[in-house]
Structure formats: C-alpha cells, structure tokens
Image (cartoon, rainbow, N blue to C red):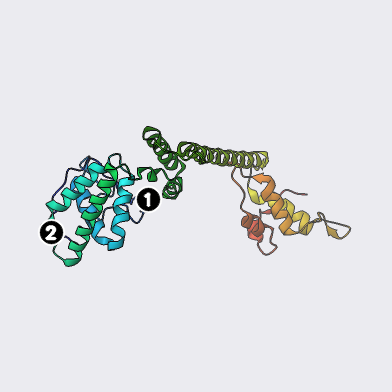
C-alpha cells in the first residue's frame, strides 16, 4: 500500500480493463478500490490520478520475475510504447518518496531497468510490437466478452488497428491477422443468424400449435365432465364408452384445447376434474352435457 497520494504523470495512452464487463488478464491495469469507477471515468473524463495509482499498485502486486512481461504486455497494446515508457519512468521518479519498503524499491529498480531495455529495443527496431497482433491472444481476450455485439466490436477494432499499423514483415505462410479477424467475425455473425432462425422457427411452431388448438368458450369442467361420463358412466357392452385411460384423456384435452383467451390448459386441473374422488370439481346436473 502506497503511503500518500500519487503524483500524476501525463500519460497520453492508458490501457485499462473495466472489470465490470470483463475478466482481467494477469497484467491488465484495473481499479482496486470499490469506490473508484471501474472504467476510470470520473466526472465525464478519464482519471489519470486513478490510472497512475492503479498502475503503481499493479507493479507492486507482481512478483519481481513478472515485471518485465507486465511492461511488455502494456507496450504491445499501445500506439506509441516509447512515449508510454517515458511517462512510466516519470511516474516512478515523481513518487520516489512513497516507496518506503525494500521490496518496493527492488521492484522499482527492476521496472526502470526493463523500461530502459525496451526503449533501446524500440530505438533499434527490435521491439516486437506485432505481438499484439497474435490472433491466439486475441481469441483469448474475446472470451472476456459475453455478448456477440461486444465480441464483434472488439474484433472490428483489432482488425482496423492492424490495417492502420501493419507490420513490415509478415510470415507469408500464415493467414494475415486481418483475414483471421474476418473469418472469426463471419463465424460469430453466422452463429447469431442461425440462433435467430432457430428462435423464430420455434416461436412459429409454438404459435402454430396454439393457434390450431380449439378454444373452449365455456367452463373447462363442462368439457372435462363429458369425457368423465364416457370414461366412468356411459358404457357399451359393459365397457367404458371410450377406450382410454384418465392420463390419456388428460393429455388429449391439454394438447387439443385452450381456454377462451387462448391460454394453455393446466394438466393438473384436468386430472383433478377427471378423478372420481373429486365430484365437487365437476358441474352440477343442470350444467352437465347430457350424453
């Protein structure tokens, strides 16, 4: 925990992750305090104060061995990593007095050493900025987005960024990054179209099924009682008038009739009305259909 407020460095780029919408990568800069906005937006503006504080806290939360991959991860996602490294160095210098423990100072020195090494790589054109166009990494980050709209937005942005910052050297044996994005975009869009067609087809079938059922204009118990009479009271040659069980009749009524408002009929209600032990659920003699 830093002892005191953090002095701000004038970062032009700041790669953060909004934990309200996505699961963070190990090296993502995220908010730490519940009272801070997860998207770093405060009063309609990006909060450099919060970013600088969270950046330093992320640095000190990592093991010493992970400081280099952390800084590399940040640089790979930036338009101008050289400027960002300069600002990061300035942020450390501005806040030296806050680093009071031996462990913090060890990590600061390691970070400064990595900053200098990466600056040299950039100046000598050895820094592999194209690593951010690793499609396996993109697919990994794609899983952080829950909706197809968010996934497509992320892919469109990644594709546009690649086309605007194409690496000078591209492996001719590999499918270009932008084409891989297009393939993934097409897959997501087709899956969404298939899902919509399936949903629409199901809705049509359900609607058709309900529409084809016969509406009962009166009380349900009058209709059920007619079946009850044929099952228990009316006989032919000593046998029930219809050759069916109470369960089969229940299924028949539920599957072929709806109430006057078009609503499905309750299976349990029909079963109760068909029970010989529930005469109170069936109509009185003057309301019965006389068969």
| Quadrant housing residue 41 | top left
Which residue is at the front of the view, 207 or 21?
A: 21
In the image, farthest residue toward the left: 97
**Residue 113 image offset from top left, x and y in percent:** 22, 55
Left or right of residue 219, residue 49 in this image: left
**Residue 192 image offset from top left, x and y in percent:** 53, 40
| Quadrant housing residue 47 | top left
Left or right of residue 123, residue 162 in this image: right
Which residue is at the front of the view, 74 or 282?
A: 74
* Secondary element type, mark 2: helix
Tell which circle, 1 or 2, labels the residue nearer the N-terminal end.
Answer: 1
**Residue 157 image offset from top left, x and y in percent:** 39, 37
Q: Which mark is residue 281?
A: none
**Residue 152 image offset from top left, x and y in percent:** 44, 39
Q: Which residue is mark 2?
A: 98
Badge 2 density bin: few <14, some 14–19, many ≥20, Cα 10 Å: some
Q: Is the C-beta separation of discs 1 and 2 under 8 Å?
A: no
Does 181 appear above or below 267? above
Q: Which-is-in-front pick, marks 1 and 2? A: 2
Q: Which residue is mark 1?
A: 22
Left or right of residue 46, residue 261 in this image: right
Q: Which quadrant, please, contains the N terminus?
A: bottom left
Q: Residue at x 42, y 38 (%)?
A: 169
Q: Residue at x 27, y 62 (%)?
A: 64
What separation in Å lies between label 1 and label 2 (alpha carbons)? 31 Å
Q: Residue at x 62, y 56 (%)?
A: 269
Which residue is at the front of the view, 126 or 216?
A: 126
């Amino acid at each position: 925990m830093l002892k005191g407020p953090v002095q701000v460095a004038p970062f032009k780029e700041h790669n953060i992750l909004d934990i309200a919408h996505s699961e963070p990568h190990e090296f993502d800069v995220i908010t730490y305090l519940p009272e801070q906005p997860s998207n770093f937006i405060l009063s309609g503006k990006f909060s450099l104060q919060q970013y600088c504080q969270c950046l330093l806290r992320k640095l000190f939360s990592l093991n010493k061995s992970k400081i280099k991959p952390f800084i590399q991860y940040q640089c790979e996602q930036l338009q101008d990593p050289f400027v960002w490294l300069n600002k990061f160095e300035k942020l450390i210098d501005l806040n030296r007095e806050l680093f009071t423990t031996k462990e913090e100072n060890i990590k600061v020195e390691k970070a400064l050493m990595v900053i200098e090494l990466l600056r040299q790589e950039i100046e000598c054109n050895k820094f592999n900025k194209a690593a951010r166009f690793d499609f396996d990494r993109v697919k990994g980050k794609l899983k952080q987005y829950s909706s197809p709209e968010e996934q497509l937005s992320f892919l469109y942005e990644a594709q546009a960024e690649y086309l605007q910052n194409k690496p000078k050297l591209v492996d001719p044996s590999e499918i270009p990054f932008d084409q891989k994005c297009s393939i993934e975009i097409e897959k997501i869009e087709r899956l969404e179209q298939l899902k919509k067609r399936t949903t629409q087809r199901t809705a049509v079938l359900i609607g058709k099924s309900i529409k084809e059922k016969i509406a009962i204009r009166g009380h349900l118990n009058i209709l059920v009682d007619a079946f009850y009479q044929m099952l228990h009271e009316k006989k032919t040659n000593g046998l029930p008038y219809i050759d069916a069980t109470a369960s089969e009749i229940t299924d028949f009524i539920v599957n072929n009739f709806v109430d006057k408002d078009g609503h499905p009929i309750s299976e349990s209600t029909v079963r109760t009305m068909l029970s010989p032990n529930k005469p109170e659920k069936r109509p009185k003699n003057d309301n019965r259909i006389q068969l």
